Image (spheres, rainbow, N blue to C red):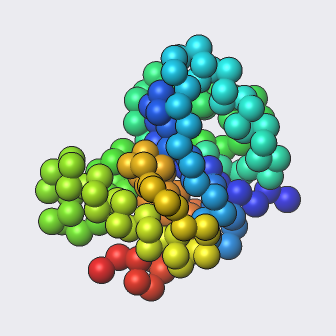
């Protein structure tokens, strides 16, 4: 049975966050691919490392999304794209969304709350791409119904 959702904040510096069907964050990281060719080669290995992957949720550059989507389709993994405005409107306050830099800082605060709620290892530092992937992933598990509501204390 498939049990996992991978959220990806797209870029050559990519944020990744894996959620289990319980709706809790299992792990998160940032990966620097260096080039589009490096990304093409790396996507296959990342997805191969998650044998129970069911969903891929992508946010960011359209051309990079297509690389992930092709590999997901090859592996029979469902994928969807989400715009930043969709996940931000659900998980950040209106004030937190008022500018790009403010939204990135706010995503970092929300991501730390998700990490704590999930019982995932606390970061020594949390890059904004990984933080955004964490919040994108929470949006994904809410949309899929893996969680019925935003966990207590995650959103103010």
State the residue lying farthest toward the top. Answer: 37
Residue 139 on image: x %, y % = 46, 61
Using the rendered view, name the quadrant where residue 146 is placed: bottom right
Q: Quadrant of the N terminus?
A: bottom right
Q: Quadrant of the C terminus?
A: bottom left
| Residue 94 higher or lower than 98, as above or below | below
Q: Residue at x 49, y 60 (%)?
A: 124
Using the rendered view, name the quadrant where residue 60 is placed: top left
State the residue lying farthest toward the front. Answer: 124
Can I make out residue 143 in this image? no
Residue 118 on image: x %, y % = 59, 74
| Residue 90 higher or lower than 99, as above or below | below
| Residue 17 higher or lower than 111, as above or below | above
Q: Residue at x 45, y 56 (%)?
A: 125
Left or right: residue 119 versus residue 123 is right
Can I make out residue 44 in this image? yes
Q: Residue at x 60, y 31 (%)?
A: 68
State the residue lying farthest toward the bottom. Answer: 152
Residue 114 on image: x %, y % = 49, 71
Labels in figure, total? 0
Q: Residue at x 54, y 67 (%)?
A: 122
Q: Nearer the viewer, residue 98 or 28?
A: 28
Q: Nearer the viewer, residue 44 or 3?
A: 44
| Residue 115 higher or lower than 47, as above or below | below
């Amino acid at each position: 049975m498939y049990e996992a959702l991978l959220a990806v904040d797209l870029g050559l510096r990519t944020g990744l966050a894996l959620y289990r069907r319980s709706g809790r964050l299992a792990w998160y990281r940032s990966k620097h691919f260096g080039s589009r060719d490096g990304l093409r080669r790396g996507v296959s290995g990342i997805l191969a490392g998650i044998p129970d992957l069911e969903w891929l949720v992508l946010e960011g550059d359209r051309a990079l999304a297509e690389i992930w989507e092709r590999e997901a389709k090859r592996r029979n993994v469902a994928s969807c794209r989400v715009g930043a405005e969709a996940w931000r409107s659900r998980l950040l306050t209106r004030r937190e969304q008022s500018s790009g830099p403010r939204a990135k800082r706010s995503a970092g605060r929300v991501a730390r709350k998700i990490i704590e709620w999930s019982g995932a290892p606390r970061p020594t530092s949390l890059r904004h791409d990984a933080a955004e992937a964490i919040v994108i992933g929470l949006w994904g598990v809410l949309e899929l119904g893996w969680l019925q509501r935003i966990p207590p204390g995650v959103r103010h």
